[in-house]
Image (cartoon, rainbow, N blue to C red):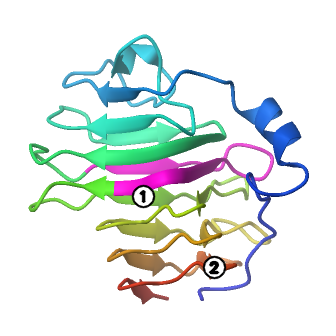
Amino acid sequence: MGGMSRPVPRLIATPLAPAILLSLFSPTRAEIITWKSNPPDDDWHSAANWIGSSAPNSSDDTAVFGLSLLFNVYITEDFNLGALQFLSDVNRSYAIWITGEAPNGHILELSGAGVINDSTSYIPRLITRADPSGKAGLLVFSNSATAGHSSVQNHGAAIEDGLGGGTVFQDSSNAGTATISNFNGISQGGFTEFRDDSSAAQSTIIS
């Protein structure tokens, strides 16, 4: 599916998971946190962009997106999130960019409900971006999370011997009714993997 895949670290349900979680994810109280209608910038991790005291970064948190002036949101850290919810009043399709600036690219894991799209007019895009340095982002669905009604776009490597962006479904997660596109790259292409008891459900996969 779009080229050779790279090894993907499991963030949940392995013997090393507690250590990984302690090192990557700060424990926080579960919250529903909403993206502002006029945020200062496009940085996911800036508390100033969210209604509340902090950006959503916990496996029990739900990040909510509604009417806003900024629709491109950039993830530049590894973290686990319960759900992404896009409200019925959105006035444009959001794009959540998972970037590749880390040693092997950043990882967003959705381990709760996954993607919830309440809009009948706009489809949110989840994009694993390949970085010019050769790294790429990774999107992981775990537990029973679903990609819902979304567009998942895995970009291919930007340079020779670089990594392509990817999406991994594990445990009993599923791709819902998403359209998943795996784009070619200069070396490795974007990829999608299904592991354990996960399924493609009613999704459309384009490679």
Which residue is denoted by mark 2 in the rendering? Answer: 193
Q: Nearer the viewer, residue 74 or 30?
A: 30
Residue 203's quadrant in the figure?
bottom left
Camera-side mark, 1 or 2: 2
Residue 37 as seen in the image, left or right of residue 43: left
Q: Amino acid at mark 1?
A: Leu
Tell me what residue is drawn at x 45 percent, y 68 percent: 153
Q: Is residue 33 above or below residue 164?
A: above
Residue 14's quadrant in the figure?
bottom right
Question: Which numbered marker is on residue 151?
Answer: none
Q: Is residue 2 magenta?
A: no
Q: Tag 1, which secondary structure?
A: strand
Tell me what residue is drawn at x 88 percent, y 38 percent: 19
Question: Which numbered marker is on residue 126?
Answer: 1
Q: How many marks?
A: 2
* Label 1 CA crowd tier, 10 Å (few <14, some 14–19, many 20+): many
Kindly report the distance in space between the C-alpha atoms of the residues bearing marks 1 and 2. 16 Å
Q: Tag 2, which secondary structure?
A: strand
| Chain part drawn in magenta | 94-115
Q: Is residue 114 above or below residue 87?
A: below
